[in-house]
Image (tube, grey):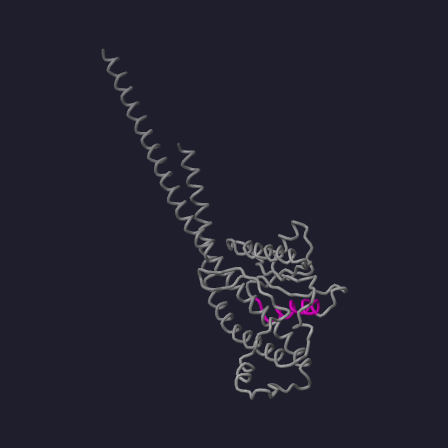
Amino acid sequence: MGAQLRVYKRRIKSVTATKKITKAMEMIAASRIVKAQRQVAASTPYASELTRAVTAVATGSTTRHALTTEAENPVRAAVLLVTSDRGLAGGYSSNAIKAAEVLTERLRAEGKDVVTYIVGRKGVAYYGFRERPVAESWTGFTDSPTYADAKRIAGPLIEAVQLDTAEGGVDELHIVFTEFASMMTQTPVDNRLLPLSLEKAPVEQEAAETATPGRLMPLFDFEPSAEGVLDALLPRYVESRIYNALLQAAASEHAARRRAMKSATDNAEELIKSLSRLANAARQAEITQEISEIVGGASALADATAGSDN
C-alpha cells in the first residue's frame, strides 16, 4: 500500500506542476488578446477604405490593369495559408489547414494549378511532412505580426500575379486565415484578394442616378493616369489586406490558446481531485491494514499469554 500511495503523490505533484504552466499560459494569452483586438480594430477601417479607393479607381476608368482584370482562362492560382508558429492552441492551425485543403481541391476541380505560400511553422511542418511543394514560407512572427511582415509577404505574391503564367506567374491570389469574431468564435475563411472583385463604387452609383440621360460625365480625373494610380494603390491594398488577416489570425491564435489552456487547467484540477481521492483511499486502506495487524498481533499475544498461564 505504501508504494501505491507514493505513486499517487508523485502523479499529483506532476499534474500540479503542469497546472501551474497551463494557468500561466492562459493568463499570458488572455493579456495578449486585448492588444491583438485593438490592432485588428485599428487596421480594419484602413483596409476597408483602401479597398473602396482601389475599387473606385478601377471602376471609374476604362484602364485594364493586370491586378484587376480577370483572366479569360485562368490556369494557376496562388494560395496564402496563415497558421501559427507555436502549438498548444487547440485546433487553430489544423482548422486553417483544412480550409486551405478545401480551397485547393475546389481550385483544382476548376482546372487550376495551385501554388502554395505559407505563414507559420505549423503549416510549413504539415506540408513538409507530406512532401508537398511550397513556393515560399515565412515564420517567426505569427503571434505579433507587423506591417513590415505583411509587406515582406506581399512582395513575391504581387510579383507572381504580375508575371505571365508561362513565366511562372499566377492568375489569382487567395488567402486562408482565421477570422476573429469574438473571444469564443474564430472561423477559418478564404478570400480572393486578386483580381479584385470590382463593385460599383457608391460615388459612381450616385452620379449615375443624378446624371442627365445621354450625357457622359467623368467621375474622376487621374494624375498621371489611372494605370499609374492603380500601380501605386494596389500594392498598398494587398499589403493592408494581408496585414489585417495576420492581425485577425494572431487574435484568433491567442483566443484559441487561452481556451485550450483553460480547458487543460480545468482538466488538471479534476485529475488532481480524482488522484487525491484515490490517495486518500489508499492511505485509509493502509491505516486500516496497520490497525488490523496491530489488533491481530495483540490478540495473538493475548492468546499466547493465556495458554502459558494454563
Front residue of 283 and 200: 200
Residue found 53% across the figure and 80% down from its top: 202
- Most prominent secondary structure in the magenta stretch? helix
Q: Is residue 11 above or below residue 93?
A: above
Please count the marks in the image: 0
**Residue occupying the far front of the picture:** 214
Q: Is residue 188 above or below residue 298?
A: below
Q: Which residues are magenta?
A: 145-161
Q: Is residue 217 visible?
A: no
Residue 238: x and y in percent read 62, 71
Residue 165: x and y in percent read 74, 64
**Residue occupying the far right of the picture:** 167
> Is residue 156 on the magenta stretch?
yes
Front residue of 223 and 106: 106
148 to the left or right of 7: right
Front residue of 167 and 45: 167
> Where the N terminus falls, by quadrant?
top left
Residue 8: x and y in percent read 42, 39
Locate residue 138: give its quadrant: bottom right
> Where the C terminus falls, by quadrant?
top left
Locate residue 116: give its quadrant: bottom right
Locate residue 57: give its quadrant: bottom right
Residue found 68% across the figure and 61% down from its top: 136
Q: Is residue 259 visible?
A: yes
Residue found 61% across the figure and 86% down from its top: 220
Front residue of 8 and 248: 248
75 to the left or right of 296: right
Residue 36: x and y in percent read 50, 67
> Is residue 20 on the magenta stretch?
no
